Image (tube, coloured by chain):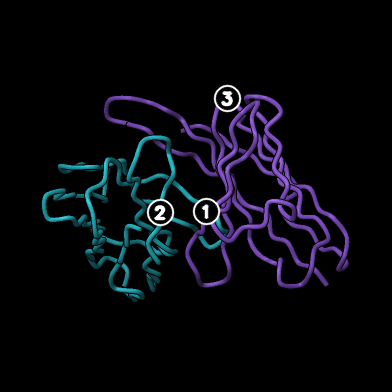
Amino acid sequence: GIQVEQSPPDLILQEGANSTLRCNFSDSVNNLQWFHQNPWGQLINLFYIPSGTKQNGRLSATTVATERYSLLYISSSQTTDSGVYFCAVERNQGGKLIFGQGTELSVKP
Amino acid sequence: GAVVSQHPSWVICKSGTSVKIECRSLDFQATTMFWYRQFPKQSLMLMATSNEGSKATYEQGVEKDKFLINHASLTLSTLTVTSAHPEDSSFYICSAFFGGSGSTGETQYFGPGTRLLVL
């Protein structure tokens, strides 16, 4: 099956710093999403981005489908950005997502 | 975004008992819901796909007789962990699949999860 690898596995930032999270996938996909899981376990959709670039406030994401990777940029990080960021891909239609192992982000005040 | 609820949010039970977890989509109809399991410090693993009015489709390695899924309506799916054992202790998360289009695409909205502890 398709493999989804995220890096780095852990990241500690000082408040205000910028960061880039990476997601590599081993085969072509028709859907890629980024999620943030807060410390209480709730998963929040960040981006639906099978290709191209999107921005939402301090967050932006870029997926280069031909090279099978996606990047999530966090600028001017805040303590509320802490949590685990997951990349998930969908190979076929129907919504079945395959998750990467996540990047655990900790933003210190 | 769409709202998906789960009940209960946490449950503690004795080994051998059964536990039912409900997943509801509150503001849209979901023909498909998914059930995931997440162990501490690990990723989400898909357990099964729940389609309204039909039998659930289980992922390889998931015991269908142990994890009973019922999708009785377009807004409700239930997961019953039968004869629970300590190794079933985990964080169970459901999602409702929204087949959108355009910039939102086909996306899933996740419930807040249910923490199960089997003693």
- Horizontal and vertical percent position of residue A97: 42, 48
In the image, A104 versus A33, the foreground residue is A33
Disc 3 from disc 2: Cα separation: 25 Å
- Label 3 sits on a secondary structure element that is loop
Label 2 sits on residue? A98
Which tag is nearer the camera, tag 1 or tag 3?
A: 1
| Residue B118 placement, left or right of A28 | right
- Label 1 sits on a secondary structure element that is strand
Q: Alpha-carbon neighbours of circle 1 within 10 Å: few (<14), some, or many (≥20)?
A: many
Disc 2 from disc 1: Cα separation: 8 Å
Determine which quarter of the picture holds residue A50: top left
- Horizontal and vertical percent position of residue B91: 63, 60
Q: Are marks 2 and 1 in contact (CB under 8 Å)?
A: yes
Query: Which quadrant is home to the C terminus of chain A?
Result: bottom left
Disc 1 from disc 3: Cα separation: 24 Å
Q: Amino acid at mark 1?
A: Leu
Q: Is residue A4 above or below residue A10?
A: above
- Horizontal and vertical percent position of residue B104: 33, 31
Label 3 sits on residue? B27
Which numbered disc flags the more N-terminal residue, 1 or 3?
3
- Colour chain B appears in: purple
Q: Amino acid at mark 3?
A: Asp
In the image, A73 versus A13, the foreground residue is A73
Q: Amino acid at mark 2?
A: Ile
Label 1 sits on residue? B46
